[in-house]
Amino acid sequence: MKPTILFTGGRYVDPASGVDEISDVLIRDGRIAEVGPALAHDDAEIVDASGLIIGPGFIDLHSHVNSIAGQRLQAMDGVTTALELEAGLLPVDRAYTRAAEEGRPLHYGFSASWGMARAAVLSGLHFDADLVSGLSMLADPHWQADSSPVQLSQWLGLLETELEAGALGVGILQGYAPRTDPREYLAVNELAARAGVPTFTHVREIVESDPTTPFDGTEEAARAAMEFGGQVHHCHVNSTSRRHIDRVLSTIDRAQEGGAKLSVEAYPYGAGSTGIGAAFLAPERLPAWELTPSNIVLVATGERIRDEAHLRHIRDADPGASCIVEFLDDDDTGDRELLASSLAFPDSIVASDAMHVTWPDGSTDTRAWPLPPGGRTHPRTAGTYARSLRMMVIDHGVWTWSEAFRRCSLLPAQVLESSVPALRRKGRIGIGDDADIVVIDPAELRDRATYLDSTRTSEGVTHLLVDGEFLVRNSELVRDSYAGRGLRAEAG
């Protein structure tokens, strides 16, 4: 039996209706039951929300944590739904089954993995719906090659089977196989559009960085959206565009004005994170990114790559090793303005690109809380949403609170809701909507995770409800809460 909870006197913000007012909010049976002044229910637990902001929990379209530990860090940052969509997993049935068996604090879901499907066919690799082990495929050049007609048919068929199993779309790591035939990218988007689900693309290189690229990555995503009419989502526009963000955003703007269903996301950090074996981190490719080996830091040890020889050694020895890549300088005023411009772009969605936590013994998950010492990840895992809201709402006033919840909650739900009915009741908190709720103290809201101390939780999330149950209560994690549910697409 789910609890009946009455929040009193809080600032209620629903981005779907545009309502922003002081109100009481009643939660019953995991849904928003009533909203209004001076509500009274004898059977409800009363929670004083005076001075606090009540809004829909954040929906992260780009989370790679896939773990209890990682989801708990995200929960303390206000997230109620964490989706693995850019990379995806194979097979998705296994991913959903494992998450359900282990339990998850947050709602979860997975796209079909273009990269793993290609590697299964072109490289003969086997996958068990695990991104951490799957990163080892970065060392294999075979899956990054063009497909023969037979191979193309085979891995497209594999993706189609995954969509029939309820995958939320297709995750396309095009930037990890940047020289492949653009016709293959179009074929994947045609498949997804026909199935009525989105694609989520880490685009291939932009022309400013590589004039020899087969296609400018952002132009390619825009073309696919225009040609097939499907939803195409451009992942982490800040990290793939770097100092060329103004041109890239203008390309996206033109495509949207032309009717393309092209959505875009960003996160507020000047460094990214990936497996060190990624194609774009090859020593010969770094100049295109205006990088040197010393801009790469190993997550597990904090060790900075010394030189080209060191980089080649690590890529050969452990291509799946998580690393941090410094593509902008967080301390530089101009670079901070570039990051802010990607967040300020109209309808830009906040998404974290959160990475799993790694401990010195190689483990990536735990039920212990607080997390055991020694765990390392990218600070965006713990701090993306607090950092974004602090920057855009509190410090600079670029967004209203209603706009902030639209960027962090409503727009992400709308990317998927045509094919995922469950998301039509998330990302907003009108009567009848799911009680996935974040309650924020704006005076205390701040991120604390740093590159050196990356698992420090954000402050200011006073309460967090997932499916109507407390996961964060009075700023403390509820350790036995595993209310997260798997979200799947439905055919038709």
Image (cartoon, rainbow, N blue to C red):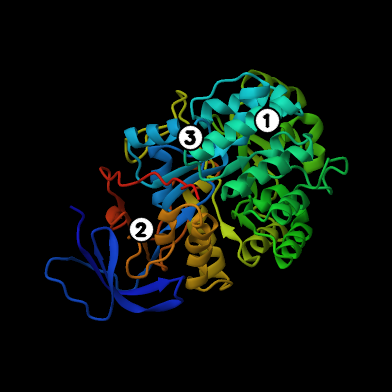
Write down the residue under mark 1: 153
**Amino acid tagged 3:** Val
Q: Secondary structure at mark 3?
A: helix
Task: Name the one closer to the observer, 99 or 371.
Answer: 99
User: x, y percentage for residue 364?
Assistant: 44, 30
Look at the numbered discs 1 and 3 and tell me whether their residues touch, using CB distance below 8 Å.
no
Q: What kind of element bears circle 1?
A: helix
* Pick the front one: 185 or 302: 185
Instruction: Determine crowd level at label 2: few under 14, some 14-19, many 20+ residues with C-alpha closer than 10 A.
Output: many
Give residue 303's position: percent from left, percent from top. 61, 30
Residue picked out by circle 3 = 92
376 w.r.t. 4: above or below: above
Residue drawn at 63 percent across, 52 percent down: 233
Number of numbered markers: 3
**Residue picked out by circle 2:** 436
Q: Quadrant of residue 444?
A: bottom left
Marks 3 and 2, the one that precedes in the sequence: 3
Q: CA distance from mark 1 to mark 2?
A: 40 Å
